[in-house]
């Protein structure tokens, strides 16, 4: 409890604010007191969780929003990181922003978290953690395995979205937070939000599930399998034990990231931005090795910048977890309705018209199942051209929807949530 | 000319017929008498062309249809190869058939070429060649570079679709064939057919362009770049000089093939066939390395079978050629209409509703440009679920369209084509 109070005291220290921003922030770390029991049957210990917080915890501790990140994210969701920029990037698509976030020190969802934003730090205490299996401070395959004194590598246990959520719960327990006003996330982050609603219905008042699904479709499973095959097929992967060898599977990771990029964007968005423009004016150079089209150069640049900041094994484990995620299989004996029966949180689903990786149809299935069960649910399809990356880009359209759903600040969020649950 | 007559005499030998089939066939080889001058400025010599023929050449030599293959095809388009099967495969999607064709000895377009089929060997003399840069008999990167006595590897010149077509023209010259009743192909094969119509308008009476485009869209360029990056990023590629080293870039090629497979199929077709079914009943094994879902196992199987039969460098060169292909840029100063101005062939365009790699919109642009120029053109969109692979699968729907376009055998094809040109 002393530990808990010290943490909360630390949280209360006011950040350096810039207009509309949560200001300068720092990632902190917390070691869980007990092992995490995993779906695969193994136990994981010790487990450290990297996290950031924005806003102030109310005396009643009833204004907490947990924000969950996607495949390549981290705990640094908002504000400016105190760490110096590690790389320069170009502005543009969400994937670039995602890659650039660490470098620029700007959180990956900075447009959504802050004073007056979707997750309004004037009202809410927003917590963001790096997920289990991560490579940005939370225990993952690059952490030291206490049994060997060496990094786990591919001996790290296969983790699931449920495991990630149970880890977040254990983390919040240490902080003395036993109730969430909301859990929110996009993509894999949305899966975590859904899992929270199913796994701990009594602890969650609302979930905001953006560009996500209750179970990735076959093509999405295929893209993820290709990405993992690219990494594991790289000899530098060394069967998962590349730490300390001076070699990392950058070539495979680069290909994985390229596949990711193309699936995160819509075909029309790619056409609009790059068309068939050549790298060097209108001159074809007849080269096999070098990029000839701008899109080729863009993909290489994105791959190159990603491998510098992200661990390949974390990519593998996280990709695996998001393909396993399947509410109906895990919690409903194959029935999505049965899986959602116990949900008590209000649910907001947001999808994007051009997202073909997490298409609106998946969110619609969740909406229909919840509605049939008489659960409070809202579903908004935002008409936007950028594909899956919209969840990182289309802040202007998301913010009013989320603010309204969370009570807009005009009513006390706690009482509002009690009314509807 | 003696050489030419000997070839034609060989052609006239009747094959062993099975019902509806062109029977047992054999790939033959022809060395071109002169160098091929390439778009990149280099000259290639010697050039050998692998080819097969089906049906009989008319005395007037006016019933020739040239069939052009796609990225991973070869000269063996129809009938049963005399060569023994090299591998066993499963039936199913077109991509599997494509992979399986060589193994089973069945041509990759056997459903379309033969007595009474789309390209009716009772009327037409069908010629199929392996394209320039190929790995199945025609000169390509695995051929011996006369300058070094070693395989070219990545010293092979970058070739274009125009280069492929000029090679086919030089090949037909040797055979004494100076006019084509039709050029036909799907995907990259359709690009070759279009290039024939533009490059040699006086020599082509009709073109059949299936599931193809005048210029691959940005996302397609991206997929191809990813595939090539996967191959070139494999250390076993050895900068393109892997022949004779005992190592081939199988891991990279496997990933390239997986990307290809997913883009050749539609998302709904994948869902329908594989869903989220697990490999082992409903038991999740929590494995990082092994396939867990059926779709994962399928992709690995396809990758494994492809690397056994196809040369990685040929994949690179062919993929590069099809991304370069751009009628407007090459022949119209950026204008598709200007590029098509000189076309005199009748054009049949076929596209498939679910093909997102070569979407119907691309064929529609060609149709509109030709129509605006007053050229004879037909455009059919076939409603079929399998994506790009439909061009190898949807024979039942394609055959009547193509037969009607080619005159259905009721009129003499030569006079019909004269009438419309």
Image (cartoon, coloured by chain):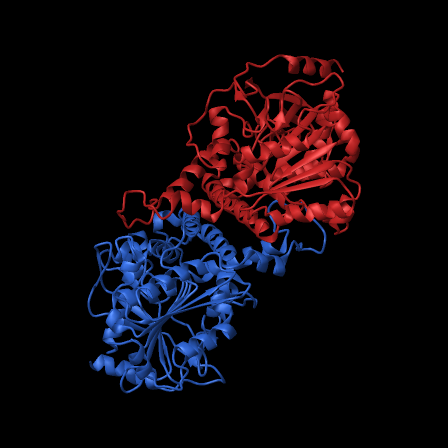
Chain colours: A blue, B red
In what quadrant of the picture does the N terminus of chain A appear?
A: bottom left
Q: Position of residue B193 (x, y in %)?
A: 68, 36
Relative to A130, does residue A277 appear above or below in the rendering? above
Q: Position of residue A380 (x, y in %)?
A: 45, 68
Q: Is residue B363 left or right of residue A238?
A: right
Is there any visible trace of residue B132 in the rendered image?
A: no
Identify the residue at image location x=73%, y=22%: B174
The one of B330 and B214 positioned closer to us in this rendering: B214
Q: Is residue A157 left or right of residue B299?
A: left
The one of A347 and A191 positioned closer to us in this rendering: A347
Identify the residue at image location x=72%, y=18%: B58
In what quadrant of the picture does the C terminus of chain A appear?
A: bottom left
Relative to A263, does residue B73 appear above or below in the rendering? above
Relative to B152, does residue A29 appear above or below in the rendering? below
The one of B163 and A332 positioned closer to us in this rendering: A332
Identify the residue at image location x=38%, y=59%: A365
Q: Position of residue B320 (x, y in %)?
A: 61, 43
| Quadrant housing residue A301 | bottom right
Relative to B244, does residue B321 appear above or below in the rendering? below
Q: Position of residue A386 (x, y in %)?
A: 54, 63
Give the total number of marks visible in the rendering: 0
Is there any visible trace of residue A161 in the rendered image?
A: yes
């Amino acid at each position: 409890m002393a530990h808990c109070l010290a943490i909360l005291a630390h949280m209360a220290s006011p950040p350096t604010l810039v207009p509309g921003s949560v200001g300068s922030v720092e990632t902190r770390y917390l070691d869980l007191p007990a092992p995490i029991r995993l779906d695969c049957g193994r136990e994981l210990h010790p487990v450290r969780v990297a996290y950031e917080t924005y806003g102030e915890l109310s005396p009643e501790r009833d204004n907490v929003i947990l924000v969950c990140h996607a495949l390549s994210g981290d705990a640094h969701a908002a504000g400016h990181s105190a760490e110096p920029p590690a790389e320069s990037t170009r502005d543009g698509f969400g994937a670039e922003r995602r890659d650039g976030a660490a470098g620029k020190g700007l959180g990956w969802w900075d447009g959504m978290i802050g004073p007056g934003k979707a997750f309004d730090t004037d009202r809410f205490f927003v917590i963001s953690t790096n997920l289990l299996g991560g490579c940005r401070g939370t225990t993952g395959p690059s952490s030291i395995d206490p049994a060997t004194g060496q990094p786990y590598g591919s001996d790290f246990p296969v983790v699931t979205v449920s495991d990630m959520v149970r880890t977040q719960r254990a983390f919040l327990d240490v902080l003395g937070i036993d109730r969430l006003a909301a859990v929110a996330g996009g993509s894999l982050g949305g899966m975590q939000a859904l899992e929270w609603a199913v796994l701990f219905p009594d602890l969650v008042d609302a979930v905001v599930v953006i560009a996500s699904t209750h179970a990735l479709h076959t093509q999405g499973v295929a893209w993820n399998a290709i990405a993992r095959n690219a990494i594991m097929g790289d000899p530098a992967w060394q069967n998962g034990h590349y730490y300390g060898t001076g070699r990392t599977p950058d070539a495979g990771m680069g290909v994985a990231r390229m596949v990711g990029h193309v699936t995160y964007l819509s075909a029309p968005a790619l056409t609009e931005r790059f068309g068939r423009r050549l790298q060097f004016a209108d001159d074809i150079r007849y080269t096999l090795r070098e990029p000839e089209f701008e899109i080729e150069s863009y993909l290489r640049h994105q791959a190159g910048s990603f491998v510098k900041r992200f661990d390949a094994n974390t990519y593998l484990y996280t990709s695996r977890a998001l393909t396993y995620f399947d509410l109906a299989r895990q919690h409903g004996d194959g029935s999505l309705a049965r899986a959602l029966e116990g949900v008590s949180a209000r649910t907001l689903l947001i999808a994007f018209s051009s997202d073909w990786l997490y298409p609106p149809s998946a969110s619609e299935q969740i909406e229909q199942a919840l509605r049939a069960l008489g659960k409070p649910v809202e579903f908004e399809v935002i008409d936007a051209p950028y594909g899956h990356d919209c969840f990182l880009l289309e802040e202007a359209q998301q913010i009013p929807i989320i603010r309204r759903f969370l009570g807009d600040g005009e009513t006390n969020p706690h009482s509002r949530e009690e009314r509807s649950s």
